Image (spheres, rainbow, N blue to C red):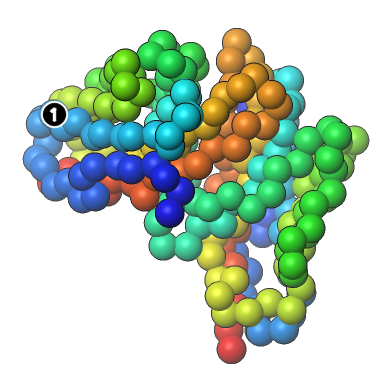
Amino acid sequence: EDKVVQSPLSLVVHEGDTVTLNCSYEVTNFRSLLWYKQEKKAPTFLFMLTSSGIEKKSGRLSSILDKKELSSILNITATQTGDSAIYLCAVLAQGGSEKLVFGKGTKLTVNP
Amino acid sequence: DSGVTQTPKHLITATGQRVTLRCSPRSGDLSVYWYQQSLDQGLQFLIQYYNGEERAKGNILERFSAQQFPDLHSELNLSSLELGDSALYFCASSQNTGLPGDTQYFGPGTRLTVL
């Protein structure tokens, strides 16, 4: 059974801290790994990592895919209160067709 | 705004009832996905449609069914509702070009409460 595990489940930091969120996966026929940020409602897309693009960066956020270790990390530097959200990791697997398998998320709280 | 629309935003109903949730994908997207998000289960993939045909099935109960219409909008039908069906139901769409990692864009969700 395809599985995505995120850690930690919850994290509380102060503004300005750097955080690292972890995601590990066990899926058949891995295609890509995606990170989403979920604030109040719908998840919004952050990054997609594939075999041909294992590192992505956007502002204070960056992510790396380790295909050997079947894992990914999401780094957020100089955190701000607006970074408070649930961060979801998902893996796109190809069985008979695509399916997106989500982890349970990491809840990040950034205190002023 | 992702471009994916869902109606209604909130739905409150009683056990045993049947409801229909509606989703319109982003313009040009052929694939529609349905997800259920509850507090204890996280985000669960239910079903995917591509250009009107069922493409993949996840953890969808037999009491639930979905379809995608010629204009590409989709409906998720939930019947014989139980208290445990209370959740946030998301629809997502993607181009599904066959390229690895087509990004899925999520709608705002429908919050279903079963009393």
- Could you tell me which quadrant the N terminus of chain B lies in? bottom left
* Residue A3 is at least partly visible in this image: no
Question: Looking at this view, is B51 or B43 the one in front?
Answer: B51
Give residue B68's position: percent from left, percent from top: 33, 19
| x 46%, y 18%: residue | B50
Badge 1 amino acid: Arg
Seen at 24% across and 34% down, the residue is B21
For residue B83, what is the image quadrant? Answer: top left
Q: Is residue B31 above or below residue A110?
A: above
How many other residues sit within 10 Å of disc 1, few (<14), some (14-19) or many (≥20)?
some
Q: Is residue A31 left or right of residue B56?
A: right
| Residue appearing at x 84%, y 33% in the figure | A51
Task: Report the residue that reaches farthest toward the bottom.
Answer: A112
Provide the residue designation for mark 1.
B18
| Residue placed furthest toward the right | A68
Along the horizontal axis of the image, is A96 left or right of B54? right
Q: Position of residue A35 (x, y in %)?
A: 65, 49
Q: Is residue B8 above or below residue B93?
A: below
Q: Secondary structure at mark 1?
A: loop
The answer to whether residue B34 is visible is yes
Residue B97: where, in percent of width, then height? Answer: 61, 22
Instruction: Compare residues B9 and B114 and report the one nearer the observer.
Output: B9
Residue B82 at what x, y percent from top left? 20, 35
Is A77 on the left-hand or right-hand side of B107? right
